[in-house]
Each structure stands twice: as C-alpha cells, then as structure tokens.
Amino acid sequence: MFIGEYHHSVDEKNRLALPTKFRLDLSKGAVVTRGVDSCLFLYTKKEWEKLALKLADMPISKSKTRAFARLMLAGAMDVRLDKQGRVVLPDYLKKYAQINKKAVVAGLYNRLEIWDEKKWEEYKGKSESNSEDIAESLAELGV
C-alpha cells in the first residue's frame, strides 16, 4: 500500500528517486503514465495490468472512454528502478505534468502520483480549503 507525501528532486537526466519504503514493491518494474489533474501516475506492473484490462474492456463507442484510454495507455512507459532507487521520467511525461526540479511523490494506495512541487502545493491548498464540501460529497457515496 502506498501512502504519504515525499519531496524529491529531479536531476538533469530526468531521474527521480522514489521513497525507500516503496522500492521493493516497484523492483519488478513499474509503469508511469499521464494522470489527471496535471500529474503522473506510477503503478506497479501488477496494478497496471489490472487497470489496463479494465481500460481494454471499456466501450470504444463512447468518446470519453476512448479519450481516457488514450490518455492512460498511449502515454504509458515501462520504467525500472536503478541501483539508487530512481526512475527516469520520459521528457513527454515530464512536460505533460510540468515537472521542474522539485517534485512530490504522493502515495494513493495502489499508485503513486508524481507532481511538480508548486502544482502539488496549489492543488493541496484548494483541496484543504474545500475539505468540508468534499467530505459531504463522499458521505453521499457511503464513505
């Protein structure tokens, strides 16, 4: 299970160190892809396979499902951790998420999200200021 918020730097070769506590789970390979809200999603191979099967089963007759599948699948890249626990972020994904030197790795149970540090702080600030409304909406869903 991935949880927590971690601040890291991206070096000149687009390498991002991942939190030590997650490295074993990611050691068999991982997939990084475009996420929503201007971040990247990073999945273990096992979790990626589950998601990819769900995406493949979505009806291609609906434009929104085609668009979401394209966002996730066409943007995906296999990544491997190096000996220092770093992954290389492809240029096109780094550009998509507008990631500069400082990044945040956020654990969200079955995936990691990778954010530009400034964008993360902005997003987190908005979410925190709307936490009561968010909580009420989730209550309607039984959470």
Image (spheres, helix red, strand yellow):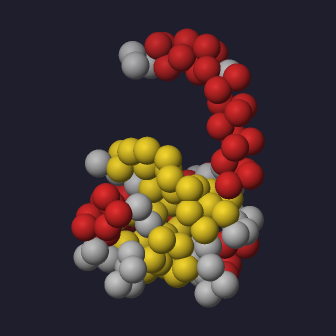
Q: Quadrant of residue 127?
A: top right
The residue depicted at 62 percent of the width and 57 percent of the height is 115
The residue depicted at 32 percent of the width and 67 percent of the height is 23
Taking the image as shown, residue 22 lies to the left or right of residue 31, namely: left
- Which image quarter holds the C terminus? top left
Q: Position of residue 112 (x, y in %)?
A: 45, 56
The answer to whether residue 2 is seen in the rendering is: yes
The answer to whether residue 60 is seen in the rendering is: no
Taking the image as shown, residue 134 lies to the left or right of residue 48, namely: right
The residue depicted at 69 percent of the width and 43 percent of the height is 121
Q: Position of residue 49 (x, y in %)?
A: 31, 66
Q: Position of residue 43 (x, y in %)?
A: 39, 63
Q: Quadrant of residue 25?
A: bottom left
Q: Residue 122 or 97: which is nearer the viewer?
A: 122
40 relative to 129, above or below: below
7 relative to 138, above or below: below
Q: Position of residue 20 (x, y in %)?
A: 35, 63
Q: How many marks?
A: 0
The residue depicted at 62 percent of the width and 79 percent of the height is 11
Q: Quadrant of residue 9?
A: bottom right
Taking the image as shown, residue 48 lies to the left or right of residue 93, namely: left
Taking the image as shown, residue 41 lies to the left or right of residue 14, namely: left
Q: Residue 65 or 107: which is nearer the viewer?
A: 107
